[in-house]
Every structure is written in C-alpha cells, then in structure tokens.
Amino acid sequence: MATVELKHIVKIYPNTEGSRKKKHLKGEPEKKSNLKVTEEGVLAVDDFNLSIKDQEFIVLVGPSGCGKSTTLRMVAGLEEISKGELYIDGKLVNHVAARDRDIAMVFQSYALYPHMTVRENMEYPLKIHKMPREEIDRRVNDAAEILGITRYLDRKPKALSGGQRQRVAIGRAIVRNPKVLLMDEPLSNLDAKLRNQMRAEIIKLRQKIKTTFIYVTHDQTEAMTLGDRIVIMKDGVIQQIGTPQDVYDHPVNLFVAGFIGVPQMNFYDGELIRKADGTYAVKVGDAVIDLSEEKNAHLKAHDVQGQDVTVGVRPEHITLDHSEGKMVKGTIDVAELMGASEHLHINAMGKDGIIIVPTLNLKASNFQIGDPIEFTFPGSMVHVFDKRTGLNLEDGPASN
Ligand SMILES: Nc1ncnc2c1ncn2[C@@H]1O[C@H](COP(=O)(O)OP(=O)(O)OP(=O)(O)O)[C@@H](O)[C@H]1O
Ligand SMILES: [Mg+2]
C-alpha cells in the first residue's frame, strides 16, 4: 500500500564498449530502437514523470528496448537512478537499498529455487526477515489459498507447469505484503491459453491484496485489460499516460495509435478540410466525411487549419454500408474468417489495411481475393494526425 512518484527520472547507461549498435553481430536482428546516445552514454529512460496512486495498477508498455525494465528496476532499487527523484509514500528513496524499499518483484523467468519445495520457496523471504514460525505459516497458507496452489505446497518447482510456477513466484512476492508489487513480463513465458488464464488470475489477485502494482509488458492486450492507467513508452520517452479507454479513444500520436488496438489502426494519406462554415471534414481518396461535433469542437478550439494529414481509422470502425460520396475504394487481399467476425485484409490508396466485418452481416460472406471493395467510416471514429509531427491534431497544431 503506497504511492509511488517518479519525478524527472533519467537513466543513462555509461558508455563502456562504445556504441552498443556496434556490438550487433551480422545476421542478428537489430533492435528497433532510436535511443539517444550522448557523451555520457545511452539514454535509456528520459525525463520519466508519473504519480502512482495508492493501490493503483499501472502498466508500462512499449516495444522491446523502450526502457520498461530499466524504469521498473530503478523503482525496485536494482538499478541506480541517474537523475531525478523517486518517492515511495512521499519519502525520497533514491538512495534506499532495494531490500529496505518494501517492494517485491516478479520476473519473467520465475527464478524459483529448484531444490526447495513450493512452501520453502514461498517461506524464504520471510525466513530471511526472521519472522516467527506461526506468522510465516499463516502468510504462506494465505498466499497459497489466494493463488490456488495449496495442494502443490510440498512439490518441487520442476513438478509444476509453467503457470503453476509463475503462481509460486507471485506467491513468494506477496507473502511479504509488499507496499509495491513490480512485475516484469510475468506471463511472457506462458503459452497463449495459459497467458489468458493467468491474466484473469492477476485481475483477481489485485482485488484480494491491497498493493500498488507496476506491471511491465510489451503486449498491448495485457496493458489494456490489466491497467487502471497505462504508460506507453518509446525510445525511453513516455508517449502517453491514460486509462485504457483514453488511449484507445484518443491516441496522442501516430505511434500510440498504431501500438494500441488489435488489429492495428489503418492509416491513409488524406486531407483535413476546413469548410466555409468553419466545420471540418476529412477527404480520403474520393470520400469526404464530415467530422463529429466533438471532433469539430476540439479542432476548432485550437484553430487547426485545413491541411494534408494522416488519417487513422480502426478496423472495427470501418463499415461497408453504402453512403453516397463517402466510399473509399480498395481491393481485397485476403479474407480471414475468425468466427464471430471476418478480417478483410485490403489494399486501398496504395496502403495495406484491415477491415473487421461481423459475420452476421451477410455481406461478409463470399469475399474473394482481388475483389473490389468500398468502405466508409463515421466522422466520430476518425483520427487526424499532423503529417510532419505525427501528433493528433485534436490536441492542436505542433508548437514548433
Ligand atoms: N546494462 C546496460 N548497459 C547499457 N545499455 C543497456 C543496459 N541495459 C539495458 N540497456 C539498454 O537500455 C535500453 C532499455 O532497456 P530495457 O531493458 O529497459 O528495455 P525494455 O523496454 O525492458 O525491453 P524488452 O521489452 O526487450 O525487455 C535498451 O536499448 C538496452 O539496450
Ligand atoms: Mg524488459
């Protein structure tokens, strides 16, 4: 139970072996990272600001190498903070040792002791703290109950499935009643089905224990389903902080727009038109679509001018219902029947994209590769981004 505050947190990994890029072997895929490299070293996290409320569930999400683990490890005290201040419950802890921060961490690799039983693994952190025997038993039994692993308490980790092992690792973390529970990609070693199950378990766990959570993942689905708020990072820099609904409805830039939501948002070159009466429309191909009142209000508030833009529309917001003058033309590349819906991979205006059509809709059947298709979208579900900066124009034109 604690608040956590990160103020202007910076992490610079000192340059020891020259540019890290040089270390890449031929044929090894290079990380898609654009981290700034300064005289001092690699800027892995840059000016990270976040105020986490007591018992809030925060998810840090972003592509590989964006600085998620580094941020988490700085909170844990496993990594030195280069600049900035970290407060736990209002107390500056930059120089407080990891073991004195009252924080527990769960790793991707379960990091269980193989020679110990489940019970011994879970007791371990309490024994180190010389807790009385009865208290240890009570806490371990409680945690095992919460996680549904009571009947495995006498087994060794190797006799458990991946999901069960991860439960034990979580158990070992929560027996200490930590103020803050940190989790670094705890589910990424599990297969898809188990991952879904464990995700639900974590949601339940969160209701049973009164702890502040910081959870790292590169999986946007985990982020969207677990987080009270999610922090989307790229190249060491926070792109957006908000509730899952906020970031889905209103991505602040192209990166967030493309990262949040599956399948990915479709992007087209288009034009933002400011009409004589001051209202806005977007033109994509031959289609001209009036924007909703809400979108109009945002654009008007910032006096956004008509201009070439990148138009974003989510696959689930596209429809095939005919509406005169509002249809974008394309062709079908692949049609995938997913059960309740069909995913149409299309090419329109030279760009690949996806449309989701409900299977109940009769039009969804009989799509053939190469078929022409026309689609449209409502003016309330379209996102307009500055072509140059990639920023959402509803937040106003870029200042520079
Ligand atoms: N000890 C180190 N020395 C130098 N650079 C490092 C070190 N550890 C991490 N980095 C760099 O800092 C950046 C951020 O790394 P970090 O592990 O925080 O990323 P991540 O978001 O957790 O990625 P992933 O999803 O792959 O786990 C990366 O570019 C990485 O190469
Ligand atoms: Mg990581």
Image: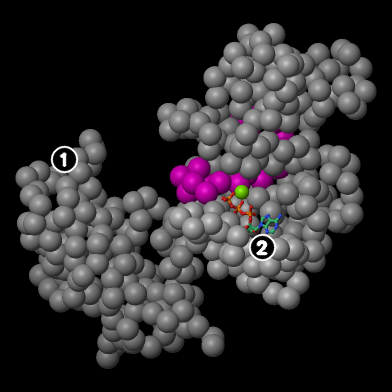
Q: Which label belongs to residue 360? A: 1
User: Label 2 crowding class (10 Å Cα cut-off): few <14, some 14-19, many 20+?
Assistant: many
Residue type at tag 1: Leu
The residue to which callout 2 is attached is 44
Q: Residue at x 19, y 62 (%)?
A: 347
Q: Is mark 2 within 8 Å of ligand 1?
A: yes
Label 1 residue SS: loop
Q: Quadrant of residue 92?
A: bottom right
Instruction: Report if residue 250 is visible in the image.
Output: no
The quadrant of the rendering that contains the C terminus is bottom right
| Residue 138 x %, y % | 80, 15
Q: Residue at x 68, y 67 (%)?
A: 18
Which residues lie in the magenta part?
Answer: 204-224
Q: Residue at x 61, y 37 (%)?
A: 108
Q: Quadrant of residue 183?
A: top right
| Residue 334 x %, y % | 17, 50
Residue type at tag 2: Ala
